[in-house]
Image: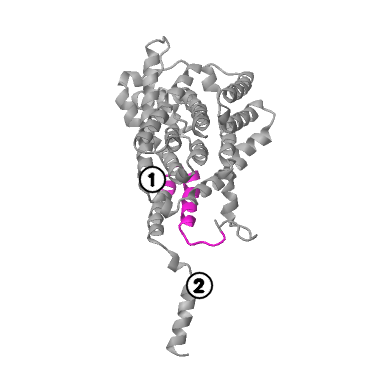
Amino acid sequence: MDGTASGSKLEQLWNLTAIPDVTWQMGVMWIVVAVLFYLAVYKKFEPLLLIPIAFGALLANLPTEGLINAPVNGEAGGLYYYISMGVKLEIFPPLIFLGVGALTDFGPLIANPRTLLLGAAAQFGVFATFFGATMIGFSPQEASAIGIIGGADGPTSIFLANKLAPDLLAPIAVAAYSYMALVPMIQPPIMRALTTKAERKIRMQSLRPVSRLEKLVFAGMVTVVVILLVPAASALIGMLMLGNFLRESGVTERLTKAAQNEVINVTTIFLGTSVGITMTGERFLDASTLKILGLGVIAFGVATAAGVLMAKLMNLFSKNKINPLIGSAGVSAVPMAARVSHNEGQKADPNNYLLMHAMGPNVAGVIGTAVVAGYFIAWFGG
């Protein structure tokens, strides 16, 4: 075989590979993927979602075949063309809420309903970021999707971004889940700056026991009231309260366990990889991505500060003092934000137990963020 023939064979073999299709944007995204894997695996920052997102992003930045392609000429599309429909058709986020509802105890909120105000106060972070985003050039629809990052609720962020700003879905999702993971780093300096040591030592009264009937009535009432006021939030609130009703009914153990485990786990894999698959270099390596990451930090900071300051304001008119640290749990990173409030309280007083008190504003934040998302959809969804 002469050299020309040998060279031709090698050229044919080279052309059969996907190596010539690799771009510099893909190379940069491999570094981003490596960082996400590091945060998830070694730092244990939201690994249940960051690992699927990162792996989806890796697949998105490889010259794949039969994975994300749309159907052509009657031939079937790629695997993730169909799986990603769970995001596009708004199926996955409500299913995540079903699992969250089945895992969540609303007892602390029912026992101390004034903590609902702390969850509401944390939504100031959403609105402050919304106005900030519009001021730097984002459309109202895009600003709404970016602002919801301040609610520290990944599924809601994905749900809203898919409706109002699908082109920004990838950076919004990554920012939302990354900052949720960084709650133990972002919140404590703000909490300490806004409170005195004496305030951090405040011991709250023990919560009263909450009956099963109260919890069932609460789930039903929230469903009715929220959907009547903000019908655009029906999918999220409906699934959240369905999961909680299953939990509290005491007669659907198999369904509750399925929602808490199989349903939420399988959905998390598909949701995360579907989000990651949108993180192509051309889409992600954009100036708007850096702006979104910056606005996400502002959103978390304002939400944390607003919750703490609301608690301090309530103490001016209340005999039963609230430890302002639990106000920071108004962001809906359940139960991480509540744990951060508890840990900061124990640094000031090792015998002070704030976890259950902090769960009140924490779960109120879940409801509040879903309501705000519904408001944005109704207002800007067209």
Q: Residues in magenta?
A: 39-66
| Residue designated by label 2 | 16
Q: Is residue 45 magenta?
A: yes
Q: Nearer the viewer, residue 35 or 158?
A: 158
Which residue is depicted at the point 60% across and 32% down?
239
Please state the horizontal and vertical placement of residue 261, each as a whole percent of the image: 60, 40
Mark 1 surroundings within 10 Å by alpha-carbon count, few (fewer than 14), some (14 through 19), many (20 or more): some
Q: Nearer the viewer, residue 202 or 19?
A: 19
Determine the main secondary structure of the stretch shown in magenta.
Answer: helix
**Up/down of 77 relative to 376, above or below:** below
Which residue is depicted at the point 59% across and 45% down?
86
Mark 2 surroundings within 10 Å by alpha-carbon count, few (fewer than 14), some (14 through 19), many (20 or more): few
For marks 2 and 1, give the CA distance. 34 Å
| Residue designated by label 1 | 289
Please state the horizontal and vertical placement of residue 223, each as a whole percent of the image: 60, 25
- The picture quadrant where one finds residue 199 is top left
If you read the primary sequence from the N terminus, does the residue marked by circle 2 or circle 1 appear first?
A: 2
Amino acid identity at mark 2: Leu
The reply, left or right, for residue 323 in relation to residue 213 is left
**Up/down of 311 relative to 302, above or below:** above
Q: Is residue 294 magenta?
A: no
Q: Nearer the viewer, residue 98 or 202?
A: 98
Residue lying at the far right of the rendered structure: 251
**Up/down of 100 relative to 110, above or below:** below
